[in-house]
Amino acid sequence: MIKPGRGSKPSGALVASSAPRSPWLGILKTCVAYTVGVGAVASIAAWPILGAQAAGSLAFGCGLIVVFFGISLLVAEWAGRHRATWALPAFLFMYFVKILGMGFLVLFSGLPEWVLAPYFMWGAIGSLVLWQFGEIRAFSRARLPIFDHDDPSTSPPTGGDHGKP
């Protein structure tokens, strides 16, 4: 007797796997892993070469990106748990709010005295690029439902001569 493969019925027919309830936490985990991993390595490598102040500035820039961008994914997760159709609009709204918030911080709030601006900037830019790379990669690999199976209007029509000779 041959065992059916994963994702198939005993008859040998393949069964479609379902999408996760919400992809947002998986995307957050991927982005944090990329950003914090590379940011920590860069900060540790910069410490003996550039000094503690430069390494701290790199880490601070990385940390701000993780906090601001992580909030939007957490809000999307929260909204998606209440109603799945709210997740993407909530994510986009928080994206707009985060851009305004970061702009406000940059324009109206100065950096602490211990932060070296060039290293902070390069840490933030590098982290932003890594975060976006992780977000695109994780979102492209997410299993998202394409069809709404609960919507009765998507069922095929019952009448007519469609398919008859």
Image (cartoon, grey):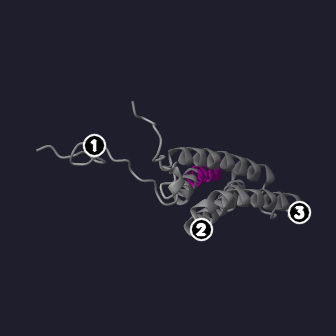
Q: Amino acid at mark 2?
A: Trp
Circle 3 residues within 10 Å: few <14, some 14–19, many ≥20: few
Q: Is residue 134 magenta?
A: no
Circle 2 residues within 10 Å: few <14, some 14–19, many ≥20: some
For the residues carrying marks 3 and 1, which lies nearer the camera in this image? 1
Q: Which residues are magenta?
A: 35-49
Q: Is residue 44 magenta?
A: yes
- Residue 47 percent location from the top left of the image: 64, 53
Determine the secondary structure under disc 1. loop
**Quadrant for the C terminus in the image:** top left
Towards the viewer: 141 or 114? 141
Mark-to-mark CA distance, 2 and 1: 36 Å
- First along the sequence among labels 3 and 1: 1
Mark identifier at residue 56? none
The residue that mark 1 highlights is 13
- Residue 119 percent location from the top left of the image: 74, 50
For the residues carrying marks 2 and 3, which lies nearer the camera in this image? 2
Mark-to-mark CA distance, 3 and 1: 62 Å
The residue that mark 3 highlights is 108
Determine the secondary structure under disc 2. helix
The residue that mark 2 highlights is 78
Q: Amino acid at mark 1?
A: Ala
Which corner quadrant of the image does residue 82 belong to?
bottom right
Q: Is residue 101 left or right of residue 41?
A: right
**Can the viewer see residue 139?**
yes
- Residue 77 percent location from the top left of the image: 58, 64
> Residue farthest to the top?
165
**Quadrant for the N terminus in the image:** top left
Mark-to-mark CA distance, 2 and 3: 30 Å
